[in-house]
Amino acid sequence: MNVLITGGASGLGLATAEAVEKEGWKALVVDVREPDQRFEHVTADLADRAESERAVRELAERAGGLDAVVTAAGIDACGRLEDVPADDWERVIKVNLLGTASIVRAALPYLKHTRGKVVTCASTLGLRPLSDASAYSASKFGVVGFTRGLAIETRGEIGVTLLIPGGMRTSFFDGRPEQYKPGPEAGLNDPADVAQAVVFALRQPAGCEVRELVVCPSTETSWP
């Protein structure tokens, strides 16, 4: 099985790529940064639709098609709306929401051919917003709506799963001001454990679909 994974250079994307390889499947990575060289990959900025489309086509052609897509790439711009530069705020929407849509749109012809699967990555902040996270919450609320709509319009053609993870121990929080970093009591999940939920969704036979999965630490503050 050929699985295209966005954000595969780090965090949940990397954990998913590693889990996919352990299953004996082939991980095809798209990231703005160079990933581990053991993975077939293409670098692309998901804020740019043309780059996203090129990455999908190139990896699909190299691998001989696609059986699944996992959209794990994501960025953030913390702060109050009035304090976050507009370009930074809008880039979060472009990468997290529009980038997800661009990747899936480009992959649809391949996935319909194989009756493949899509797993999108939202967030618990896509169900319950927090202050100083309007860009991230808006993008992830968008991913929730996009995925639910996609599942309706492609039913019977491809499988669609919405993954809603809580906080994970990744580099996602690096470089933030201290007030926007999780404290030691946060009890964040290991991304490798969350990646197993992705694998579970991908393992389902055609016609049997896991529509939505919430995977979060037991102490997650942004859910329910």
Image: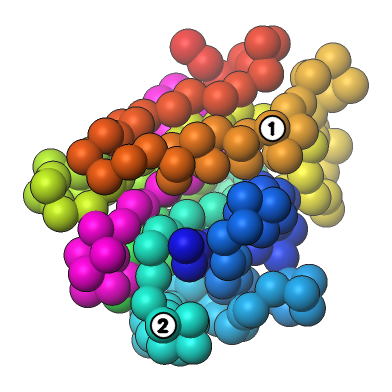
Which residue is painted at 62% across and 57% down in the image?
24
* Mark closest to the chain's N terminus, 1 or 2: 2
Give the residue type that dot 1 points to.
Asp
Which residue is more in the foreground, 77 or 195?
A: 195
Label 1 with label 2: CB-CB less than 8 Å = no
- Percent x, y of residue 17: 65, 58
Label placed on residue 147: none
Kind of residue at badge 2: Gly
Pick the front one: 72 or 128: 72
Colour mode of the rendering: rainbow
Other residues around mark 1 within 10 Å, as few (<14) / some (14–19) / many (≥20): some
First to last magenta residue range: 107-134
The location of residue 168, given as percent across then percent down, is: 71, 34
Instruction: Say which mark, if any, is on residue 193.
Output: 1
Q: Nearer the viewer, residue 106 or 116?
A: 116
Nearer the observer: mark 1 or 2; the answer is 2
Q: Tell me, yes or no, whether the highlighted magenta stretch contains residue 28.
A: no
Q: Which residue is mark 2?
A: 64
Q: Position of residue 106 (x, y in %)?
A: 30, 75
